[in-house]
Amino acid sequence: MAHRVNWFEIPVVDLARATRFYEAVLSTTLKVEDFHGTRLAVFTRKQEGDVTGALVHSAHLRPSLEGSRVYLDAGTDLDGAIRRVAQAGGKVLVEKTSIGVLGSFAVVRDTEGNAVALHAHVTAH
């Protein structure tokens, strides 16, 4: 396998609300499905081999600002994604931060109380 990470789950209280938040912030569409009795909203892959994951509503998972942090690909418009956070009901916790040749990131709180990072790679000019 090409990646050490192959799946992530972001716990949510309200799957519909969280799905709207992530679709708005990332300008994407998530696929809502039922997997062995658990409701998921799956981040779609841009291409075969991409790492993906899902928003998960489960009694066994709780949203949190602490613990592991997922860095989601904000594409080429990190500034736009950051602007959409508040409009979609979230809050920016760490403003856009440059990490040099690795790009930039911001940390946000989603509608469910999770801290997630939005990341954009440096684009070649």
Image: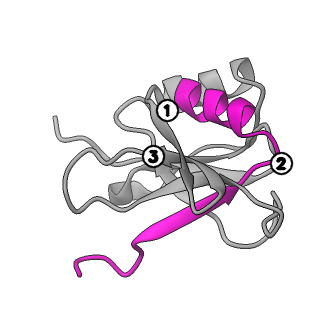
The stretch of residues the image draws in magenta is 1-25
To which residue does mark 3 refer?
43
Q: Residues within 10 Å of mark 3 (few under 14, many from 20)?
A: many
The amino acid type, in three-letter code, at marker 3 is Phe
Dot 1 falls on a residue whose secondary structure is helix
Report whether 32 appears left or right of 123.
Answer: right
Q: Residues within 10 Å of mark 2 (few under 14, many from 20)?
A: some
Separation (CA) of disc 2 from disc 3:
19 Å
Q: Residue at point 49% right, 32% down?
A: 26
Q: Residue at point 49% right, 50% down?
A: 72
Q: Position of residue 11 (x, y in %)?
A: 72, 57
The amino acid type, in three-letter code, at marker 1 is Leu
Report whether 59 appears left or right of 108.
Answer: right
The image shows residue 13, relative to residue 71, as above or below, that is above
To which residue does mark 1 refer?
26
- Judged by depth in the image, the label closer to the viewer, 2 or 3, is 3
The amino acid type, in three-letter code, at marker 2 is Gly
Q: Residue at point 82% right, 46% down?
A: 13
| Residue 113, numbered label | 2
Q: Position of residue 29 (x, y in %)?
A: 44, 30
Dot 3 falls on a residue whose secondary structure is strand
